[in-house]
Image (spheres, rainbow, N blue to C red):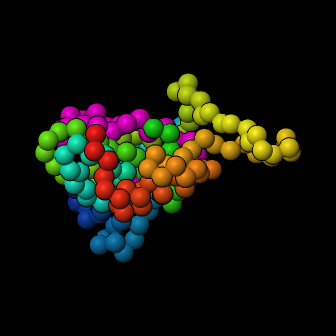
Amino acid sequence: DLICHMILGRDWIQQNYFNVNFCTNRIYLYNDLASTPLLPIYRSEPVIMSLSHSVVIPPFHQKFIYGYVPLKSLDDALFTPNIALQHARMVLILHSLLHIRDNRGVISIINNTCHSRYIPRNSPLGFIYSSTATAGLNVIYASPMNFSDSSSSSLSLLSCNYCGVRFSTELTLYDHLFHCCTACPSVTR
């Protein structure tokens, strides 16, 4: 059974043509002529992050990839990897803290095998939780020492491992790493 603003039973689902699009979180009816949203996803419940585009990871390499989340925006989201994907594809996906912007988040994925690994588009990468407080995690911030004004906001300790450039937000760091990773040779582990 599907739950949206109307409850759709299996008998109705089997008799009528419809398409469930989890990317837009809507049910499209009658060859996409009409649609209705699925019930909203509450931020206290985990949501699935799926792979935006297919990816091939060379042997012993790490890549930063974009994943799609059915939430428009979310700060300090906790990502936990899909264990089944890691076992099936033999890749390592790390737990991480990230920001969701425009339904996208960036995660790191590592291939520790001697063979290239292909992961198809829309593969479930893992789960996004809205709060890091329930996981008992803290984000470490440093106060700027060069400023005499104590009311200025603190800067986050984020920097690129490749070029050392510092960033104030994880999103700008992840965007930089994603573009740097595609422009520079991949990191060999």
Is residue 10 among the parts visible in the rendering? Answer: no
Q: Residue at x 41, y 66 (%)?
A: 35
Residue 90 image position (x, y, % from top left): 19, 37
Q: Position of residue 180 (x, y in %)?
A: 41, 58
Residue 134 drawn above or below residue 11: above
- Asked if the magenta segment contains residue 164, the reply would be no
Q: Quadrant of residue 53?
A: bottom left
**Residue sitting nearer the eye, 117 or 159:** 159
Q: Is residue 137 left or right of residue 25?
A: right
Q: Position of residue 74 (x, y in %)?
A: 56, 48
The residue at the point 13 percent across, 45 percent down is: 115
Residue reaching furthest to the bottom: 33
Q: Residue furthest top?
A: 136
In this rendering, position of residue 86 left or right of residue 127: left
Q: Which x, y percent locates residue 181?
A: 37, 56
Q: Count of labels shown?
A: 0
- Is 75 inside the magenta-drawn segment? yes
Residue drawn at x 34%, y 72% as measured from the top left: 32
In depth, the one of 154 and 27 nearer the eye is: 154
Q: Residue at 59%, 51% (x, y): give it.
A: 167
**Is residue 187 shown to the viewer in this render?**
yes
Please state the extent of the stretch shown in magenta in the rendering: 66-95
Quarter the C terminus occupies: top left
Taking the image as shown, residue 14 lies to the left or right of residue 66, namely: left
58 or 77, which is in the foreground?
58
